[in-house]
Image: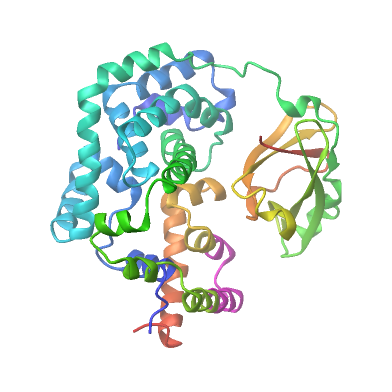
Amino acid sequence: MNRPNFVLKLDQKAGRDWSAAECKRVIAWLREREQERLVWFAAARYLGVAVAKEDVEEAWVAFYTETLEAARLSYRPGGPDFVTYAVYVCFKRECVRRGEKIRCRCKSTVSLHRAAVESETSDEELIDAGPQPCGIVERRHLIEEINLFLAGSGIPERQKRAFELRYLAEMSNEEAASEMGAEIGTVRVWAHRAAARLKDHLVQKGWAD
Amino acid sequence: MGPGNGLWTRLKNDLSPDPHLTDVEFIEFAADVVDAVEAVRLRQHVAGCSQCAGELSSLREIGGVWKDSAAYLEARISQSKPVPSEPKQEAWWAQALAWTSLAPLGRGLAAMAATDDTAFVDFAVENEDDTPVDGLTGVIQRRGDEYYVRVAATIEVHDRYRGRMVDIAAVDNATNQLSFQRKIGLGQFVLIGTKLDITSVKLSARLIP
């Protein structure tokens, strides 16, 4: 996505240090139709599947009235640019929180049988799809194996950290970059290098073909 | 038998020559804001991947709803409170009573900065009324020249505070100027910076209601 020059320049200083005119300018740009569409799609994606139009609408309005300002106040230069930080880090967190509440609200109204009919699976299949004890134990063993490898493999610290954030903390590249205060592309490369070495190791250990 | 969980699937997908679309790619592709070269690659992947095609189709479905109601949403934003350019009320940390000095982390900093030595300082987490939160403790850790912060809950209160966030503020002892402020979830080590000048910094933490 292309950013205008004045937005790129703002990325060089903390959001708290922006002047009132700079704030107004970046907000005005984000209120242009193309960016509004982007925020709408981000809300739809991050809220999760099967949310109502009203939920997306509410999150979308919240972006312009609350999240944007919160993102500005917490923005620090060095990591992702401001728009990426606001939309793909702060707004994502906000939507995930909202999505969780929406699912909790709906849970009591959706029966197992109804869910099975909607997804065309039997009740038994639906129960089988839930987390099973053997799966949990297997996952724990995998994470132990990964931790052992990370501790003893001699992978550089930054690659290790990028991997932990991306795969163990389940963050996106944008969130990991924000946590590490580094460029998104750099974090992606760090995580990829660690992941490639780990994959070879896991295949060698017989975890997968 | 493979690990059979999301971690392994993500690892394999990220390392594959034609990975599935990321959240950011889904959003920008659906909103038509990706550049032409990137769009060709994404289009090619979607054409041969029923999973991504399905997800993109449901995202575009909800995008169509936005086009129809843009004027209504515009009105809703106008009715909402305007985005403030400066925080309206005084920050909570300006009135905080409990502060923890970070000076112990700075001992022999010059000598240790280039090593992997670590140092810890514990701190308390408080409620809005300045009373300590039972079962929540924070730790700030220096690893070489990187500083991490983590807030953990005891087993007894873990479920009670699941999903809650803690606001951490560090201010300069002498000037009372904010050095850094972060909102973090429970349990994760979060990088707050590198080579910080922490010898004259104190820290306070508050559970977000």
Question: Image height check: is B191 above or below B77?
Answer: below
Question: Image height check: is B4 above or below A109?
Answer: below
Q: Residue B102 is drawn in which quadrant?
A: top right
Question: Image height check: is B7 above or below A171?
Answer: below
Residue visible at 24% across and 51% down? B55
Q: Where is residue B47 shown, x and y percent of the image?
A: 13, 56
Q: Where is residue A185 shown, x and y percent of the image?
A: 41, 52
Residue visible at 51% across and 75% down? A133
Question: Image height check: is A12 above or below B113?
Answer: above
Drawn side of residue B15 relative to residue B125, left or right: left
- Considering depth in this image, is A54 or B173 the residue closer to the camera? A54
Drawn side of residue B43 relative to residue A165, left or right: left
Q: Where is residue B174 shown, x and y percent of the image?
A: 85, 29
The residue segment tinted magenta is: A143-161
Q: Quadrant of the C terminus of chain B?
A: top right
Colour pattern of the rendering: rainbow
* One can see residue B154 in this view: no
- Considering depth in this image, is B67 or B11 the residue closer to the camera? B67
* One can see residue B39 in this view: yes
Q: Residue B36 is drawn in which quadrant?
A: top left
Residue visible at 39% across and 42% down? A47
Q: Where is residue A172 shown, x and y percent of the image?
A: 44, 52
Residue visible at 52% across and 31% down? A71
Q: How many numbered marks have been drawn onto this rendered protein structure?
A: 0
Q: Is residue B175 magenta?
A: no
Main SS, magenta residues: helix
Q: Is residue A159 magenta?
A: yes
Q: Residue A113 is drawn in which quadrant?
A: bottom left
